[in-house]
Amino acid sequence: MNVVVCGISHKSASVDLRGKISFAPETVIQVLQDARSILNIQEVALLSTCNRTEIYLYGKVTDIQIITWLSMIKGAELIMLKDCFYSYRDQKAVRHLMRVASGLDSVILGEPQIFGQIKSAYSVGREAGTVSTMLNRVFQLAFSAAKRVRSETAIGKNPVSVAYASVNLASQIFANLKDVHALLIGAGETIDLVAKHLREQHIGKITVANRTLSRAQELVEEYAAEAILLADIPDFLHRADIVISSTASQLPILGKGAVESALKKRKHKPLFMVDVAVPRDIESEVEELSDVYLYTVDDLEEVVRDNMKARTSAASLAESIIDQEGQKWSKQYRALAAVDTIRAFRSSIESIRDAEIEKALTALDRGQNSEDVINMLARNLTNKLLHKPTTRLKQASEEGRDDAINATKDLFDLNKNEH
């Protein structure tokens, strides 16, 4: 089949390596088109989130070819990639994608955001012209499985996500959020969810910092917040008690110096920070500062463990749904495998038919009796169509291969003639 799913994730690689291997959204279309050419494959799609970078391929390609290409374009050491790189093929590849789309392979079991991210990866692949027949079937099956898991199990009923985990951690550190000021950096889906959860926890004040004020303004209006530019953060930082950052920046937004300056203005009043971006928005050196509590996406797995208990029982039911959908794929693939045989069979029969029709028409042109010509056409067609099958059946019988005899009876519905 040659369907491959491969990459790195939160289960196999550190946040720093995941950051190095991540792809900026604006580069993905070109990366896909280059990958198809360089790896000499038919189809390819790419998913790049804070928790995983996965490549979905259709074509004859080895793991080492993929790893070498990834290492080359991202400037990562080959040995480091090999240590955390995973690869699934054909049936296992399809099953893995279904599990990812359903949130069964996420840091937070059943988190819903990944489904939208995979749909986006599929759409970008279609836009790039690198996703067509085979991967389209694979993605559609994954979407179907994810929708079934979402509707038939309780795995997504509790609001657990990276955003929720961030707010949950903040509520554990601050006894009362009513007097707390939160600075949210970025204006994407994660920050939107963070703002929503903070409002539900009756946060005192929210400020949203973004590269442009227009997108931040949407959150401002929805959550009664205020907006500032990223460039204003150093002057504003000392006013925030909570900082939660999630941008698509390839470089850190906050450095150790800016945070150190803010702490002096705060007279070393503790600052709680959560960096859910990959690559990091907040320099890792900030952890060295006293009075700063900095958490990354990897830290959140520990924080949300208690929240996952309610979803554990639903996961087993979800896995059974994945198994059912995987069986559907097996049936579809087996049907696809027969297509080439059917096409070749029809072509062979039509070739014999066309040759015999041409002979019959020639005979009619010569003035031969039409009834004789029709009988000759029917006889020749019958003989030529039956010649190879009867020869093979006699050979199978001589060799004691009853399977071929029984398959022929089943194929042409001959069993009823035995009664």
Image: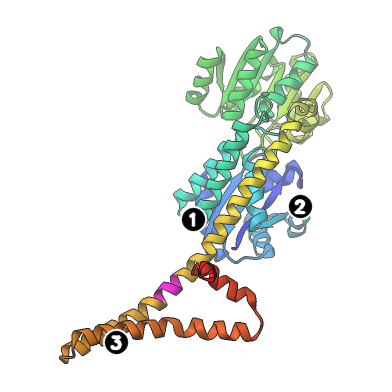
Residue segment shown in magenta: 343-347
Residue count near mark 3 (Cα–Cα under 10 Å), binned few <14, some 14–19, many ≥20: some
Residue sitting nearer the eye, 319 or 369: 369
Assess disc 2: are there few (<14), some (14-19) or many (≥20) residues with their C-alpha within 10 Å of its C-alpha.
Answer: some
- Residue under label 1: 130
- The location of residue 175, given as percent across then percent down, is 78, 10
Q: In the image, residue 226 lies at what x, y percent?
A: 56, 15
Q: Residues within 10 Å of mark 1 (few under 14, many from 20)?
A: many
Residue 206, quarter of the rendered image: top right
* Residue type for callout 3: Met
The disc, 3 or 2, on the residue closer to the chain's N-terminal end is 2
Residue that carries the numbered disc 3 in the rendered image: 376
Q: Is residue 300 above or below residue 24?
A: above
Q: Which label sits on residue 95?
A: none
Tell me whether the residue at label 2 lies in contact with that at label 1, contact meaning CB atoms closer than 8 angstroms: no
For the stretch drawn in magenta, the main secondary structure is: helix
- In the image, 237: left or right of 188? right
Q: CA distance from mark 3 to mark 1?
A: 52 Å
Against 88, residue 164 (above or below) is above
Quadrant location of the N terminus in the rendered image: bottom right
Q: Is residue 145 above or below residue 159?
A: below
Indicate the amino acid at tag 2: Cys
Dot 3 and dot 2 residues touching (CB under 8 Å): no
Residue 6: tell me if it is visible. Answer: yes
What residue is pinned by disc 2?
Answer: 84
